[in-house]
Amino acid sequence: MSTAMAADLTSKQRQILQYLRDNAGTKTYFKSRLIGKELGMTAKEVGSNITALQDGNYDVEIEKWGYSSSTTWKVST
């Protein structure tokens, strides 16, 4: 990821991206509410910020996967 792209992210987006990078090696599916719980955000905050990350050119691929008891995201590196 280039520095220019990193500068375009909000602090919440950078937090979520780092969380996904740190955990994508051991997990594939992430629920918005559980990410939020770990990072001190609501599930809605995670969902709106993760959507912005989907459109960027980062070293993780994020795909909306399901909606059962919170949106689930499939993340791969």
Image: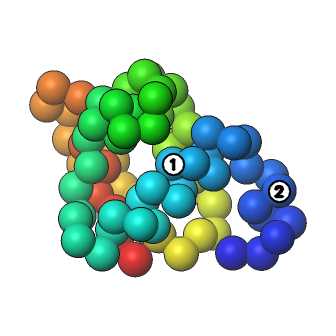
Q: Earlier in the sequence, mark 2 or mark 1?
A: 2
Q: Residue 38 is drawn in which quadrant?
A: top left
Q: Give the residue type that dot 1 points to.
A: Ile
Q: CA distance from mark 2 to mark 1?
A: 14 Å
Q: Amino acid at mark 2?
A: Ala
| 39 up-or-down from 16: above or below | above
Percent coordinates x, y for residue 23 in the rendering? 34, 64
Q: Position of residue 70 (x, y in %)?
A: 24, 29
Seen in the image, is 2 located left or right of residue 22?
A: right
Q: Nearer the viewer, residue 23 or 61?
A: 23
Which quarter of the image is occupied by the N terminus? bottom right
| Numbered disc 1: secondary structure | helix
Residue 6 sits above or below residue 3 on the image: above
Above or below for 61 versus 50: below
The label shown at residue 57 is none
Q: Is residue 54 visible?
A: no
Q: Quadrant of residue 7?
A: bottom right
Q: Is residue 1 above or below residue 74?
A: below
Residue 43 screen position, x and y as percent:
38, 26
Apparent side of residue 73 relative to residue 20 in the rendered image (left or right): left
Location of mark 1 (residue): 16
Q: Residue at x 78, y 63 (%)?
A: 5
Which residue lies most toward the left here? 68
- Which residue is at 77% across, 75% downward? 2
Which mark identifies residue 7?
2
Element type at mark 2: helix
- Foreground residue among 43 and 68: 43
